[in-house]
Structure formats: structure tokens, C-alpha cells
Image (cartoon, grey):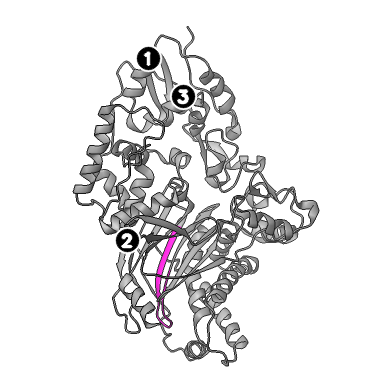
Amino acid sequence: MPRCRGVRAWPGCRGWSRGASLLASRTPPPRAVTLLLPRGIPVRSSSLPLFSDAMPGPTQLFFPLIRNCELSRIYGTACYCHHKHLCCSSPYLPQSRLRYTSHPAYATFCRPKDNWWQYTQGRRYASTPQKFYLTPPQVNSILKANEYSFKVPEFDGKNVSSVLGFDSNQLPANAPIEDRRSAATCLQTRGMLLGVFDGHAGCACSQAVSERLFYYIAVSLLPHETLLEIENAVESGRALLPILQWHKHPNDYFSKEASKLYFNSLRTYWQELIDLNTGESTDIDVKEALINAFKRLDNDISLEAQVGDPNSFLNYLVLRVAFSGATACVAHVDGVDLHVANTGDSRAMLGVQEEDGSWSAVTLSNDHNAQNERELERLKLEHPKNEAKSVVKQDRLLGLLMPFRAFGDVKFKWSIDLQKRVIESGPDQLNDNEYTKFIPPNYYTPPYLTAEPEVTYHRLRPQDKFLVLATDGLWETMHRQDVVRIVGEYLTGMHHQQPIAVGGYKVTLGQMHGLLTERRAKMSSVFEDQNAATHLIRHAVGNNEFGAVDHERLSKMLSLPEELARMYRDDITIIVVQFNSHVVGAYQNQE
């Protein structure tokens, strides 16, 4: 009886699917076989139940794939991709998880690992693999590594804040993580700014936007007199008035090398605001300020890349920022006035507590992708009718990009001549990069992409308890109503009991007893999480089919090697903002 053997990878990582699919489509022989799993873990088994029960924890997740003739997806992990966001047509990675879809031009980025041969050769072992799970302290250490909490003083010297505080956290899937987050208090005006940023084609653009966007928003909100005072201080060499007070985790860094370049671009912006505003009008339109800030920063990112910099490091940095991309979802909270500015497919969700104690979700942003009919119509109207069928293909912009609005991504904004000119005059790293030289198909009437945000206004009410800002890594795994319910129950310590739904699964009395026991223990125990965002990530990654956190599943998901983690989820970044209902109610009573 022939044995199953490893399948050799062909150049460009395109040879996995054919051989592995043939292998997986055959019925396993009754005798023992050796199967090669990710990370070069071979498993010898004489029966399928033994294989399923005895395999190591992280790899047990992949047995359903083998059972469903999807072994090719597992074998694809031997291909190492320098640019995961531009991966070639790998058979194992669902296209919905990629910001960029596959294209032949991207294949040059992928090469087998130097030691790829060990992935392709099955080894036979007589011993049965032992189960391995992360312990609860190890799981908590991973989940809490990037958590951050901030409590807002009830009175900040100007007004009583409607924000009690916020919790934030991140869980990476990409290496390095491409998401970013920011939170700051406006010092020269009122209110707080909070935002999440989802990068693609690398983290350069999301990093730059997370550092710079709040300054552009704060400057846009400043009155004419304050702008003049700041400009005079710069001219005379005096100390500047602080504009923002940042609330950052130690891992949320600033790029010191680019600080001078960023400051000069920001100064040019406020000088133009001074020239445009004569000081006659004192009313600041927050919606207009948010839109102008988003658009101006994106314009500066593009201009800096075109002009370049004599410093070789900065020159390469501004080009990487411009050629990568990022979506942004930003909230500005001032008293009872809540504005959400969104560009891309991150979301803002409001948690509302009803009179009976239950929770409902109110969406304060719209996804800018193919699932939004208004976005599809907008794109088609902005380009000639003969491009109606090519501007969006396979639910992607020009067949490549998932979000229809984003910062950076100059490949979808610049003319072909400008792209070639910048690349040819740029550093060798850029000129040798096949992606940057690749022109999207059907590229006739750029720009196809914009960073202009869609701004939503909401007046806070006493029943509005919290706001969740999160990148799409969360919304891909959880329904909005579940997100709001989990956070609401966590913040209030009250669990609104619902009948346990088994979703069509056949559940024994013993399993049902276990579910009820688990729910009772959850109600009576003190929450192990001290951060609402961490608690939400725990559910997003570890929930089982019954909606309860399964430690075994959570351990497996957190044990996945980085080559596989992106198969199952995206980077997750969450900010949970808690409102002060008493202050919000007092605002209403004053009116």
C-alpha cells in the first residue's frame, strides 16, 4: 500500500496545491500512514480517531482540513513570503483575509525558506505525540502584553469630562503587527481623540498616520488666535504650546528620525489655515475639520514621497509610507458631541443599555468596501462608463484592494508616469521591488482611491454606555451584537441570561450540564481581565460554537506559528471608551 509522502514545493510556491490536493483526495489506507503537518510535525497514526485525539494542540485544529480534502492549504505553509500582504496565489490562505489579492507579479516576493526541505519530507516516528496546551498564565501573558488603560480625571480644569476612561489592546497575527492605535486629549480645545489604524502592504503607513493624524485634527480645530500664537512662537524660537496629551502604551512608539519632517509639513498646514482664516468666524465645524485633516495628511504623505529627502533613510521611509496603506477610524468626544470619522473598513460601535438591562448595538460607521452599495456607486460615478466593469472586480478595487478608501496606497492614486519617475529616481530597494513597479490592471483614470472620511455625528444619551473602536480583525470573528453584549456585561458585571443556543449541534445531556456549569462559574467568579479590550479579544479568539470561551481552543489559537496565524485571523486592535452617564445626563438637563 503506498504511503503518503511530503509534496515538493515548486518555485513561486505554486506547486503545493496540485500534488497535495491529489494526496488529500485519496481515502487514507487502513495501515499506518505518516502525514506531514505545519512546522514539520509528522504524525503517525493507525486510525483517524487516534490521529485527531493524540495530535499536538496547535495542530489539532487542522484535522478538519485534512478530512475535507484541503491538505494543500496545510502544505502551503512551507512557503515563506517576505510580503504577506502581497502573497502569490497560495492555496492555503483565504483571499478574504488578504488586503491585496493574488497576482502573477507578486510571485517574485515569495521563495521557499532556506530549510524548506525539512517541510517536504515526512519522518516516521513510533511514539504517539503528546498534547500540548498553553497554561492559563501563559495565555494571559500573551493576551495582556499590549493592554493599556487610562482613567480620565472627572474635572480637567476646563469642563467635566463625559469620558470615564478607556481600555485598549492589540493581538498581532502579522509579524510585525500592521495595526496601530492612538489616544490623546486635546489641550488647546476640548475633547478627546481616539483611533484605530489598520495597515496593509506593511506597517509604515499605519505607523505614520497613528503619529500624525491627531495633530492635523487638533490644528484644524484651533481658533485663529491660537494658530497665530503658535506660529509666532516658532518664529521667535519660544517654547510651543502643547497641543495634545498622548495616552500611549510603551510599545506605541514615535519615529524620532522623521519628527522634523513631520513638523515642517504640519507647520505648512497651519500657516495655510492662518492665511485662509481672517479670524472673523469663531465657530469651528468639527465635521469639516475632521475631513480636512484626513485629506491634508494624505496629501502630505503623497507630496513627501514625490519630493524625497536628502537623507537616504528618510527618503526610503517616506516612500515606504506612501506605497503602503492604512485605514483609519477616529472618534472625537467633546461633552455629549460624538463625531466618528472613518476611512476604510474598521468600525465604531456604540453600546446602548436598554431599560430591561439588555444591550443593543448602534453602528456609527460604514465599511468602505464592496459590501457597501453606496461605495460601489460612488466609484462607478467617479470614472468613465467604460470602466464600470473593471473598477471593481471580485469585490476589490481594480481586482486588488479590499478597502475602497485608505491613506497612502499611491499605486492607486498617482499617474503611471509619476509612479515610474519616482521609482526610477528612488533608492535601489524601491527600484528592485517588483510590487512597486507593478501597475494595476485597467489603470486608466487615477486616482481610484481616496482618504476622505465619512463622518457620523451622534449626540450622547444617558443610555449610551460605551464605544468600541476596532479594526476588521475583530468584526471578522464576532457579530456586533455579541461584541456589545460581552463588553456591556463585563463593564456592569451583570449577565443578561439567554437560553443556551446549540446552533443545530447534537448535544448530550452531559455536554449541556457542562455548559450550564461553566456559565454559573463565570457568573460567580471575579473577572480575570482588568481590561475590557483584553476581555473582548479573549472571546474573539477563544469562543467555541456555543459562544463560551474555550481555554483549549484559545491555547491552540495563540500557539499557532506566525506562518499560520494569518490563516485564521487578522491583527486585532480594540479601544473601548466608557462614558459617564451622570455627566451626559447633566448636559441634557442643562438644556
Which residue lies most toward the top here? 1
Q: Specify the principal SS of the magenta part.
A: strand
Residue 516 belongs to magenta span = no
- Give the x, y percent position of residue 295: 60, 70
Task: Sort mark 1 into few (<14), some (14-19) or many (20+) by Cα contacts within 10 Å.
Answer: some
User: Residues in magenta?
Assistant: 180-193
Q: Is residue 503 left or right of residue 419?
A: left
Structural distance between the alpha carbons of marks 3 and 2:
40 Å
For mark 2, what is the residue? 148
- Give the x, y percent position of residue 384: 79, 57
Instruction: Mark 3 or mark 1: name the one nearer the start of the chain.
Output: 1
Q: Secondary structure at mark 2?
A: strand
* Amino acid type shown at disc 1: Ser
* Amino acid type shown at disc 3: Ile
Residue at 43% x, 47% y: name it: 478
- Give the x, y percent position of residue 12: 60, 35
Instruction: Mark 2 or mark 1: name the one nearer the start of the chain.
Output: 1
For mark 1, what is the residue? 47
Q: Secondary structure at mark 1?
A: loop
Structural distance between the alpha carbons of marks 2 and 1:
47 Å
* Amino acid type shown at disc 2: Tyr
For mark 3, what is the residue? 66
- Between residue 540 and residue 91, name the one nearer to us: 540
Q: Quadrant of residue 514?
A: top left
Quadrant placement of the C terminus: bottom left
Structural distance between the alpha carbons of marks 3 and 1:
13 Å
